Image (cartoon, rainbow, N blue to C red):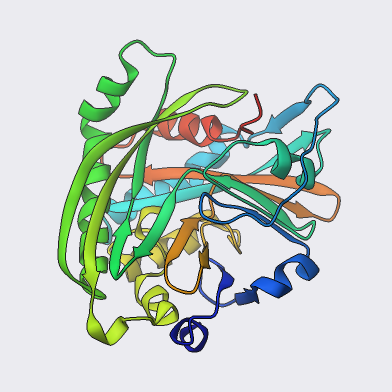
Amino acid sequence: MDELSLQKVPYFFVIDFLSENVEIYQESEIEKSGLLIDFQSFSSSKKAHTLNKKVEWKSFPETLESFKIGFDKVQKNIRLGNSYLVNYTRKTKIETNLSLEEIFYHSEAKYKVFYKDFFVFFSPETFVKIIDGKILTYPMKGTIDASIENAAEILKNDPKEKAEHYTVVDLLRNDLSMVADNVRVDQFQHIDFLKTRQKNLYAMSSEISGIVKPEFDGKVGSIMQKLLPAGSILGAPKPKTLEIIQEAEGYDRGYYTGVCGWFDGKNVDSCVMIRFIEKEGEKLYFKSGGGITHMSKLEDEYQEMKNKIYVPIH
């Protein structure tokens, strides 16, 4: 990645959650690879598609009792002081009459990728952007059902959601300081509206920026290596929280909650791979979750995990 970005060669990259698999596609290789990409700054999907069927969508979430097993492990570690924010995720079987490719074409999101009949995601969350030597990150933490009266205000002022958001902003500010100078929070607790077929949600994000340090200038790979895994989908402190996640979740996240991005020869736009559907054999699984703090309530976290199992096709 560094070699190509220093040579100013455009490419698309995909990095899994544990940074064990890194895939790089130069622009001429994208079409042959079977990848379909639709970012704000770049799109490889040229065709217009119409959907001529009624969307069928069923999800089969685990029971509250099953969810509680990992939740309790997370809470125990938080009480012991091993972590103060853990992003706990689950894998839910879904059934739909849509193919992964149809989901890609018809869902609406800031970032969409279809990966060779293996997974599709439609993510609302930017990871980092690099624009003219300035690096920006937009951690997203905190969601609420938008149909609740005064939902946006409730989300902004909820003590648990606020604590979670403050923690992630602090974590990302520290992370960014490893690769950038003059790091600052430009926008705090910004509320985004996410429209979905199942239910509409509000999500809370902030904007943090800095100036890329001279030793990282043009080195996109080195920057990603320092910043990954993304703090918003891991928790804090990072190394210990990663251990807790692996014990509590009991499944391999794979590419889910990894990052992918487009380097155009000068600037970078990247996202966190959330709102993620993966194919295993003939079955489809939706991976979703949320941040757990000492204030988290089991039923609320279970509900949040279920709320996020949606497809943004209207």
User: Is 163 placed above or below 1 here?
Assistant: above
Residue 210: image location, x then y, percent: 21, 64
Residue 170: image location, x then y, percent: 20, 56
Residue 80 can be seen, yes or no: no
Residue 6: image location, x then y, percent: 44, 86
User: Is 184 placed above or below 159 here?
Assistant: below
Q: Nearer the viewer, residue 103 or 241?
A: 103
Left or right: 68, with 95 as reference point: left
At x 81%, y 47%, the residue is 283
Left or right: 28, with 162 as reference point: right
Q: Nearer the viewer, residue 244 or 55?
A: 55
Left or right: 247, with 143 as reference point: right
Q: Residue furthest top?
A: 149
At x 65%, y 74%, the residue is 25
How many numbered discs, if any? 0
At x 51%, y 82%, the residue is 1
Residue 60: image location, x then y, percent: 69, 33
At x 23%, y 59%, the residue is 209
Residue 313 can be seen, yes or no: yes
Left or right: 105, with 138 as reference point: right
| Quarter of the C terminus within the rendering | top right
User: Is 30 placed above or below 296 here?
Assistant: below
Q: Nearer the viewer, residue 228 or 287?
A: 228
